[in-house]
Image (cartoon, rainbow, N blue to C red):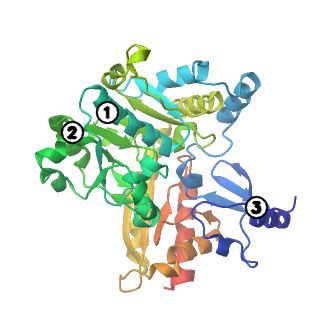
Amino acid sequence: MTSEELRALDKAHVWHPFTQMRDWNAPEYEPLVIVGGRGSVLTDADGHTYLDGNSSIWTNIHGHAHPKIVQAIQNQAARLAHSSFLGLTNEPAVRLAKKLTALFPPGSLPRVFFTDNGSTAIEVALKMAVQYNQLEGRPEKCRFAAFQGAYHGDTAGAASLGGIEMFHGRFTSLSFPVMRIATENDLAALDAETIRSLAGIIIEPLIQGAAGMRLHPPGLLRTLREWCDRHDVFLILDEVMTGFGRTGKMFACEHEEVIPDFIALAKGLTGGTIPLAATLTSEKVFSAFLGDYAEMKTLFYGHSYCGNPLGCAAALASLEIFETENTLEALQPKIVLLGELLRDMADNEPHVGDVRQCGFIAGIDVMTKKGVPYPWQKRTGARVCEAARRHGLLTRPVGDTLVLMPPLCFTEEELTQAVGALRAGLREVCGG
């Protein structure tokens, strides 16, 4: 099919996420149709190529069509694409569970529950935490604390934790019981009754993604771990975005040597190829659910594609690539270069405000010349990214925060080119 035919059919039948479809379906708008990807580069239906500046919405790790992952998926598809994980198991899922638990200190997070995506990885952690306390005779511990500006997904439970009005405000009447905190000082102000009602505290470690790549203060994660230990509250880490090397270590929690009670993984788990998620937890949590069937201790939760063999095979291949290609070691000088490029951008572009970096993640605020935000209705960040596309870069902003989160395989040359495209887009849209 031609690109024109594909665009027409898309506008006739498809509803895209986080997209105002009136603008999308406007006759003058020509959506980009992606038909191929290799390494750091995506190709559209008209033959144009672009650097994948946001890792295809924060998922891709080693580049598109990495031969080891492709081969692993092909081999597994020829044997078994899927079978039920309810009452059955499969080799890739078993091997992956062992591999994931081995990424943490021995015995700390030995149990793995597979789901489909980041939202469901969070959802099952919430239900495990609540049911655990019910089974332990503490049904009053059923609330959660989450941070202002947080984003943990869009299923009902995960959305309840979200602190972004634009995404979650319409559905507050359907929310789980959640209290909002802004800093660690808010925890110190909680009364004893409120603390007794908490099943868990959840955080995106080190950096909040959808809030605009906002950094948490150093040491916050360690403080939360200690507070949760003192008050018998679960610590839940949402590493859906930060996991698998994004921050310079395999997991963000390693920077402060914190082990949570639950950790949610998705996005980069399969290297950005097939939907798969995992929630890891402790033997203490797992053991509380054991008993006779008649005791009704079973966790009655799951999805049709839990433990999908194709996804697990892809994830195993991705983890092997980390080892064989020394991915994290090779990433360190590129993190340094990214910092240098961002500092030069902040110093020399008049429409750049605050610039934030966490490993291989960057957030760049677009401002007026006086350092005042543009009216959000003008979609300045989106227009800058559209302009950067003309310079060979694909990325998507969060409001007026430009996001650069490339695959870990980006070369230093590609990194320089990507930042250059953002700067060119800024000048076209904002002047300077």
The N terminus is located in which quarter? bottom right
Q: Quadrant of residue 341?
A: bottom left
Side of 347 where 407 appears, left or right: right
Q: Earlier in the sequence, mark 1 or mark 2?
A: 2
Q: Amino acid at mark 2?
A: Cys
Disc 1 element: loop
Return the x and y of residue 235 as percentages of the image width and height.
29, 39
Q: Are marks 1 and 2 in contact (CB under 8 Å)?
A: yes
Q: Which residue is mark 3?
A: 13
Q: Amino acid at mark 1?
A: Asp
Residue at point 82%, 64% (across, down): 3
Q: Dot 1: within a 10 Å radius of its alpha carbon, few (fewer than 14), some, or many (20 or more) residues?
A: many
Task: Examine the rendered structure and indicate whether residue 17 appears above or below residue 400.
Answer: above
Q: Which residue is mark 1?
A: 261
Return the x and y of residue 173 as percentages of the image width and height.
40, 58
Q: Amino acid at mark 3?
A: His
Return the x and y of residue 215 as percentages of the image width and height.
33, 57
Asked if residue 244 shows in the view, the reply is no
Task: Examine the rendered structure and indicate whether residue 82 appears above or below residue 238.
Answer: above
Q: Which residue is mark 2?
A: 228
Disc 2 element: helix
Asked if residue 235 shows in the view, the reply is yes
Disc 3 element: helix
